[in-house]
Image: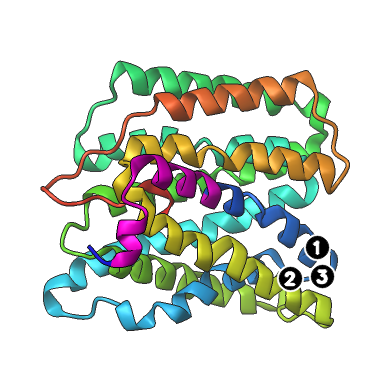
Amino acid sequence: MNSTSRHFASPARATVVVATTAILFGLVPLFARHLQAEGIGSAAIALYRYAFTAALLIPFLPLSRTKRGEALLLGGAGVGMGLGWVGYLEAIEVAPLAAAGVIYMSYPLFCVAFGWLLLGQRPTARAVGAGALILAAAALLLDPGALGPGATLALLWSIPAPAGFGLIVVVLCAMTPSLTVMEKMAAGMMGATLGLAPLALAPEAGALLPVTAKGWALVAGMGLATAFLPQMLYTIAAPHVGAARASAAGSFELPTMLAIGWLAFGETLGARDLTASALVLLAIALSPAIRPQQATAPVAARSV
């Protein structure tokens, strides 16, 4: 164990670090909405977020023959995660952050579904209960009368984001036992980058490059504060607390999004929003961890 890892060896200290990284992840809409206001396309914003970290992790790409299969599997899951995140960005452009955040944080339901489909891990009573809470939260928010048809449709199109994230969590935790933590991050981020690049470069995808100094500062800030830095901290700290506790601490992302919507964008938080958010937080606390197929040190969910 190196000196940095020993610094986070205390479970209590590591839990605080995981919660702090969740808060940093929750800052994404603060950068993304301002970039969207400058005309930057959602695919380009997603590309900037993943490409920044992918470029730094190129030396860790697992290229050996023995690891190539798992790396390609994880890269494919990364493609799905990156493309799904475009739908999430489209949703936060037109829908309240509270609603978009609740939909995005429904990923434990998809973790359970993919764990069953790919690993044969039948849902437990806790998993079924967590899924019911998430569905109840979504039903509270996906009301065209309360949101307007445009926002409701955008939220529905954002469902691939938690689905893609749920898939990559299962692949990370249970289907890539021979890869190190850094190799997993490198493969997943590279997959997301390669999947997003053609979409971001398409003529109809919106502007690719910022035209102001503020825009470039937002790109740099998003890459550092919501991608590379929290991913590094999370990767170091999460193994010291375990997947279940890391997921619970990671739920701090949702209240961060609610606070940004309220403080930065003047969004009103009603009883419906707060109730749905509470249901999702409870579901995350109830969700069981994905069990690896082989003995390995699994990466907790937020390493991407």
- What amino acid is found at the position of numbered circle 2 in the picture? Leu
Residue marked by disc 3 = 39
Query: Which segment is the magenta one?
Result: 3-21
x 23%, y 80%: residue:
63
- In the figure, 52 relative to 162: above or below? below
- What amino acid is found at the position of numbered circle 1 in the picture? His
Quarter of the picture holding the N terminus? bottom left
Q: Which type of secondary structure does the marked residue at label 2 adopt?
A: helix
Front disc: 1 or 2: 2
- In the figure, 268 relative to 37: above or below? above
- Tell me which secondary structure the magenta stretch mostly adopts: helix
Q: Are marks 1 and 2 in contact (CB under 8 Å)?
A: yes
- What amino acid is found at the position of numbered circle 3 in the picture? Gly
- Would residue 121 be visible to someone looking at this image? yes
Residue 236 at what x, y percent from top left? 36, 58
x 61%, y 58%: residue:
86
CA–CA distance between discs 1 and 2? 8 Å
Magenta stretch contains residue 10: yes
Which of disc 1 and disc 3 is earlier in sequence? 1
- Would residue 95 be visible to someone looking at this image? no
CA–CA distance between discs 3 and 1? 9 Å
Which of disc 2 and disc 1 is earlier in sequence? 1
Q: Which type of secondary structure does the marked residue at label 3 adopt?
A: loop
Residue marked by disc 1 = 34
